[in-house]
Amino acid sequence: MKTLEKTITDYYTSWNEGFNTKDDQQIRSYMAENFVGIFGYSTIESPEKYDYHYDIVSVLSQYPEDTRKEFSIILTTERKNGENYIITGTETSYINGEPHLAQCMYVWGLEGTEWKLLREYIEIEQ
């Protein structure tokens, strides 16, 4: 079984490859089918909610092929005897070479022997 840290690294690699290929299959493979996400930033009144079926290809298509994401873990909180973790950290997206920061909280859980993303909460800093 892959460690959770390796799974998170691979998840971000799948996003970086997705920006290049505009293919969402690898990204979606890390999500649980009951996945729910919340995305917010300072210029909207209410954050956007999305789920497993959201259009990742449209998201990827909004960005140049050389867009890259990185994630730095700040805190890891174990739950359910190690079957579930809350991961908080900072995501840095490099769009046209410029960094854009977001604060993130992820909930990862074990499904069989694989880590799956159950929930994500992302708030853009700007």
Image (tube, rainbow, N blue to C red):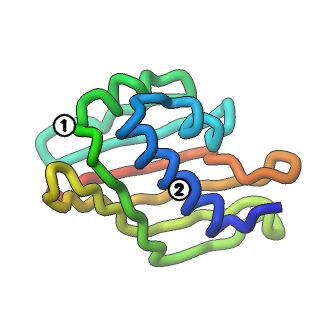
Q: Identity of the amino acid at label 1?
A: Glu
- Depth check: give the residue in front, 7 or 31: 7
Q: Are marks 1 and 2 in contact (CB under 8 Å)?
A: no
If you read the primary sequence from the N terminus, does the residue marked by circle 1 or circle 2 appear first?
1
* Residue at 38% over, 63% down: 70
Q: Residue furthest bottom?
A: 74
Instruction: State which quadrant residue 94 falls in.
Output: bottom left
* Residue at 16% over, 57% down: 97
* Residue at 33% over, 30% down: 59
Q: How far across and down, in percent of the image, does residue 76 sit?
A: 58, 74
Q: Which residue is mark 2?
A: 106
Residue 90 vs 102, above or below: the answer is below
Judge from the rendering whether residue 33 lies leftward or rightward of residue 23; answer left or right: right
Q: Residue furthest right?
A: 112
**Closer to the camera: disc 1 or disc 2?**
2
Dot 2 alpha-carbon crowd within 10 angstroms: few under 14, some 14 to 19, many 20 or more: some
Q: Which residue is mark 1?
A: 45
Instruction: State which quadrant residue 55 falls in.
Output: top left
Q: Secondary structure at mark 2?
A: strand
- Separation of marks 1 and 2 at Cα, in angstroms: 22 Å
Residue 103 vs 61, above or below: the answer is below
Q: Identity of the amino acid at label 2?
A: Tyr
Q: How far across and down, in percent of the image, does residue 81 sit?
A: 83, 69
